[in-house]
Amino acid sequence: MTPAAERGGRLTCPDTKRTVRRDRELKHHFQATMPDRSSARPPFIVVHGDLDRAPAPADHALDGAVVAIGKFEGVHRGHRAVIGVALARARELTRKAAALTFEPHPRAVFRPDEPVFRLSDEAAKLRLLARTGLDGAIVMRFDAALAALPAEDFVRRILVERFAVAGVVVGFDFHFGKGRAGSPAFLEAAGRRRGFTVDIVPAFSDGGTRISSGEIRSALAAGEVEAAAALLGFPWFVSGEVVHGDRRGRELGFPTANLRLDPACGLKHGIYAVRVGIDGKRYDGVANFGRRPMFDSGVVLLEVFLFDFNGDLYGKTLEVAFIHWIRPEMKLASVDDLIRRMEEDSGLARAALARAPDAFPPI
């Protein structure tokens, strides 16, 4: 992230209107665009906020910080533009810099009957935020009480009285408070009255495409994982514990690690080249996400076959990064045809992964 530049008394991010060439082959690791949190840096602080609970002493660790506010779903390049401005303002004010985010996803509160395809759950979001250079994150519990809080009360109770913020940074389309009455202009006026700085970051686009969580979800729903990675700045990934399956893959000569993803996962069903993190090591592989038409049991699974791996993975947590789309699921004429196709898929996956040797999320 290019450092923010001061212009007219306000901080703006010069990269927010710059078109950045997409790297379809993901040859550049995400760490090249993210500050490195070395071992000498203090640990990332996580503070939880709740309107109905008095803060404990440890909950004041980020008081007085410059906060970047948002859902930060996926912590994509647009989010990092906002975070970059917060980091610059915090340096200017010699304050900590933090993200102020919300859990659960607000849509789960407003429309509980509609599943939310999360680009990153709370744990993954915090891991990604920890790699941005921020000192910490404030996680506000989003519930009916917070949703009903008027914008002025949000400023007074949360920003001023609870966290005593030194500054606030938001995107151009950020709204908050009951009925989304709090706009960027409202926030700027509140900051002038109450003594904290406010920076509004314009839209971040790439090649004419505005970078947003919605665009990334749409790309993943189409199986376009490389396009999603270009918007995120790193390959999209999921985490999950390996569970027992029917062992059919082992019988076919392709033993798989099976993961049950969130039922709301909107990734297109199909075959993907993947890179997998296990206990701090990385392995290449090929994965099937879907119902496996040859043996459909109605259960959606992510089945991962790791190349050049031998070991017991049951109960372990895998980080699976989706690097390249290979093909949709299909029902073949025979098991022999399936085995031949799986061998072909493995070769295509190896070739795709060789073109992107460093592609992996910053986790």
Image: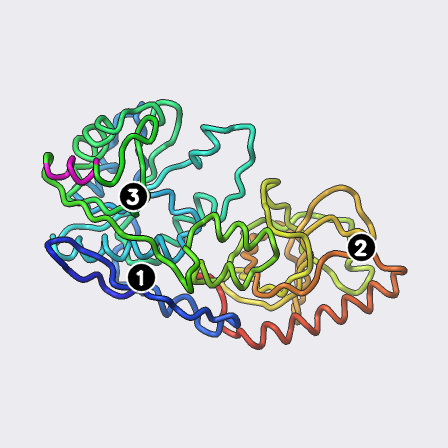
Instruction: Pinpoint residue 351: horizontal percent, then vertical percent.
Output: 63, 76
Q: Which residues are magenta?
A: 186-192
Mark 3 vs mark 1: in front: 1
Residue to which mark 3 is pinned: 69
Q: Quadrant of the N terminus?
A: bottom left
- What SS does tag 2 mark? helix
Residue to which mark 1 is pinned: 17
Residue 247 forms part of the magenta stretch? no
Residue at horizontal 49%, vertical 63%?
Answer: 280
User: Which amino acid, mark 2?
Assistant: Arg
Q: Quadrant of residue 80?
A: bottom left
Q: Is residue 135 left or right of residue 337?
A: left
Of residues 45 and 79, the one nearer the viewer is 79
Residue to which mark 2 is pinned: 248
Q: Is residue 341 left or right of residue 12?
A: right
**Do the CB atoms of the residues marked 3 and 2 lie less than 8 Å apart?**
no
Of residues 359 and 168, the one nearer the viewer is 168
Q: On screen, 181 above or below 220?
A: above
